[in-house]
């Protein structure tokens, strides 16, 4: 929903204040404000859809992790669509209000298909 509305505030609110995002071929991005800037740049570059497909999920009282495949659809030009596929790991931590927020997120592109 936040992605469809290009709402970077709502996207950033999915992360803890001290979250770390590890995008491919880039330095780690730490903190909610920096992650908000990352998503702002991504939306400006043409990200229009993200699909996460969990393959494994587990949790304890305060931490949960998810491993799976992702697909990101970009439309950087009027008649161009790019689809990026790969793998991701997401670690969430339970907050005092019992909500879950992203603490660490890692995504890596899949190797090119032959």
Image (cartoon, rainbow, N blue to C red):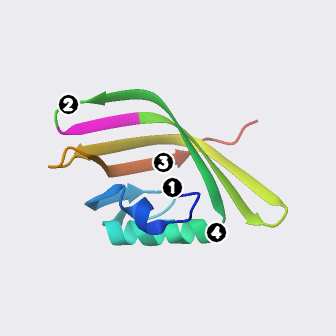
Disc on the earlier residue, 1 or 4: 1
Mark 4 or mark 3: whose residue is earlier in sequence: 4
Side of 95 where 78 appears, left or right: right
CA distance separating discs 4 and 3: 18 Å
Residue at 42% across / 49% down in the picture? 106
* Camera-side mark, 4 or 3: 4
In the picture of the structure, the residue carrying the numbered disc 2 is 60
**Mark 4 and mark 2: span between their CA atoms?**
37 Å
Task: Decide: few, some or many residues near mark 1? Use Cα within 10 Å; few <14, some 14-19, many ≥20.
Answer: few
The Cα–Cα distance between marks 1 and 4, rounded to whole angstroms, is 16 Å
Tell me the crowding category of disc 4: few under 14, some 14 to 19, or many 20 or more residues within 10 angstroms, Cα based: few
The circle drawn on residue 24 is 1
Which portion, as a residue range, is magenta? Answer: 62-66
Closer to the chain start, of discs 2 and 3, is 2
Q: CA distance from mark 3 to mark 1?
A: 6 Å
**Tag 2 secondary structure:** loop
In the image, residue 4 above or below residue 87: below
Disc marking residue 45 = 4
Whether 64 is among the magenta residues is yes
Question: Which is more N-terminal, label 1 or label 3?
Answer: 1
Furthest toward the right, the residue is 79
Say which element carries label 1: loop
């Amino acid at each position: 929903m936040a992605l469809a509305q290009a709402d970077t505030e709502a996207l950033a609110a999915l992360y803890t204040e001290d979250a770390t995002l590890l995008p491919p071929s880039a330095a780690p991005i730490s903190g909610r404000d920096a992650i908000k800037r990352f998503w702002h740049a991504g939306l400006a570059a043409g990200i229009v859809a993200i699909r996460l497909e969990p393959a494994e999920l587990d949790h304890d009282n305060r931490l949960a992790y998810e491993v799976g495949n992702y697909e990101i659809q970009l439309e950087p030009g009027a008649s161009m669509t790019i689809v990026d596929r790969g793998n991701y790991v997401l670690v969430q931590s339970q907050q005092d209000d019992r909500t879950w927020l992203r603490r660490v997120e890692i995504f890596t592109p899949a190797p090119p298909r032959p």
